[in-house]
Amino acid sequence: MVSDVKIDVRNLSVWFGSNHVLKNIKIGFRPNAVTAVMGPSGCGKTTLIRAINRLNELIIGSRTTGEIYIDKEDIYSKETSVFELRRRVGMVFQKPNPFPISIYDNVAFGPRIHGVSDDKELQGIVERSLKEAALWDEVHDRLQDSALDLSGGQQQRLIIARALSVDPEIILMDEPCSALDPMATSKIEALMRKLAEKYTVIIVTHNMQQAARVSDYTVFMYVGEVVEYGITKNVFENPQNELTEKYITGEFG
Amino acid sequence: MGSPRSSRNGFLRQIEGSVIYILCLFAVVASLVSLVVLLFDVIQDGIPWLDLQFVTSFPSRFPEQAGILAALWGSIWVVGITALFSFPVGVGAAIYLEEYAPQNWLTSFIRLNISNLAGVPSIVYGILGLGLFVQALALGRSILAGALVMTLLILPVIIIASEEAVRSVPRAYREGAYALGATKWQVTRGVVMPQAFPGMLTGTILALSRAIGEAAPMIAIAALVFVRFVPTGPLDRFTVMPIQIYNWVNLPQAEFRGLAAAGILVLLIVLLGMNSIAIFIRNRYQKRAR
């Protein structure tokens, strides 16, 4: 397990105020794979992935201890630029959150804040990102329309394009399909598989079928701890922990 | 607490609903009626005097020759310079308080006091302005001094409105920008400010509308009453419309009351114009955002 790890989480604890949300997490995420993080509400799934792009820091009263290494670099060390880290670690949110500006400007936002100002270059990035997010064919003739005119599924793919625009290595997805219909969900799921060829993808999901369908590895969390972690097929067919089995068979959750 | 099935309770609650409805309706009608009566009275008195001659003439001893030109320009100068100062300072303070200031007791204390300042009577600002701008800073009884007093007067209102506008920007937008690696300033500049801008602008224009109707602080810094020139720069002496109106009301001849009414009409037209601009800007930006 140790040899082939993109994100190495070591003894990670996160508190919000006095609430100990993540308790001494140790886990290694594999490169070029989809890892699903499952578990009942409030178990810390979202907090875990938001620790990887240090988004938890935005919440007043949060505290993080332990280390996370991406390619052997400690992202919580003082030398690490949080802005550069977040460029390398893209994020897709539970509810699509395009900015209330044009489709083009949404995708160009990331490159612009990282210093790309040449129009030709921006156009190239926007086109490449939208194509990679399987949205180009639907929007190429209306890039100047407001992003809010897109359907929910299209918006979520726009968010994926926005994340891809700054050339990330890792893509975090926080229940990306929970606000979408089945059609839109299947498109995003197909996209996740494709993205895994190039990126390290981690998704938080409540939906066990989804985890079984799209992920290579599955993490099962319970009240702030990792209970089980392994190849998805094994976790679902032959869970080692009683809690995992109960959750998968629907006895609680 | 009775059960919903109790018919007597249901009947009582219906009565209660009707009573509240009638009371609210009465409140609306009472305020509207008094406003309409007032407006009607002003229009009746003012219309005969409101003509081109009125808005292009200086005050005069002779009612037929008197006009509001100097006061109109004085008001425009004061409000214009007030806008120049108050918008950037107010918006800057709001952004600092919402985005940058640590959320601790000191910030809460500052916020509380800004709310308190919004309730301080305008004459107090006038007296402060007399001591600070007119005398200590030696600006004299100039437009600049008047505009600075007005700026102090409306700053709390602008800050509160702008803070509200900043606060109403959804967290999801900020997080989306942060997740792309934006710095705090890039998030503020790129996401928060465009979203909050219409609210900030509306708040500012409404505050300026308040400033243009204020007489007390201008009297305190002793703006002139009888001005027979149009100000040409921020250090000129000046008068404003409310002072001119107040002056006419105090004169014994009945004709000057007509002039006062006409002055009120001009003031109202300027006010309505400013408010329409606020509404126009807000609608335009909201449409673009949808």
Image: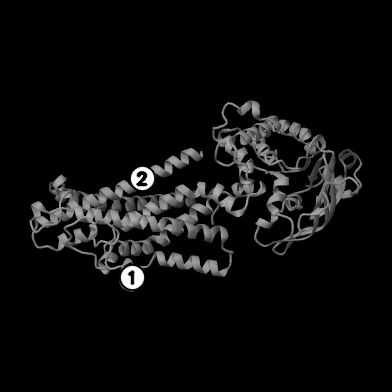
Disc number placed over residue B194 in the picture, else none? none
Q: Quadrant of residue B156?
A: bottom left
Q: Residues within 10 Å of mark 2 (few under 14, many from 20)?
A: some
Q: Amino acid at mark 1?
A: Val
Residue B102, given in percent of the width and then of the height, sits at 59, 64
- Asked if the residue under mark 2 is in contact with the one under mark 1, i.e. CB atoms within 8 Å, the reply is no
Chain letter of disc 2 in the image: B
Could you tell me which quadrant the N terminus of chain B lies in?
bottom right
The reply to whether residue B51 is visible in this rendering is no
Left or right relative to A128: residue B187: left
Residue A138, given in percent of the width and then of the height, sits at 63, 27
Residue A251, given in percent of the width and then of the height, sits at 82, 45
Q: Quadrant of residue B230?
A: bottom left
> Gap in Å between the C-alphas at discs 1 and 2?
30 Å
Residue identifier under label 1: B124
Element at label 1: helix
Residue A154, given in percent of the width and then of the height, sits at 64, 33
Q: How many marks?
A: 2
Name the colour scheme.
one colour
| Residue at x 30% of width, y 50% of height | B271
Instruction: Give the vertical position of A56 relative to A124 (above or below).
Output: below
Chain letter of disc 1 in the image: B
Element at label 2: helix
Instruction: Give the vertical position of A127 relative to B258 (above or below).
Output: above
Residue identifier under label 2: B277
In terms of sequence position, does the residue under pointer 1 or pointer 2 come before the other? Answer: 1
Instruction: Give the vertical position of A226 relative to A116 (above or below).
Output: below
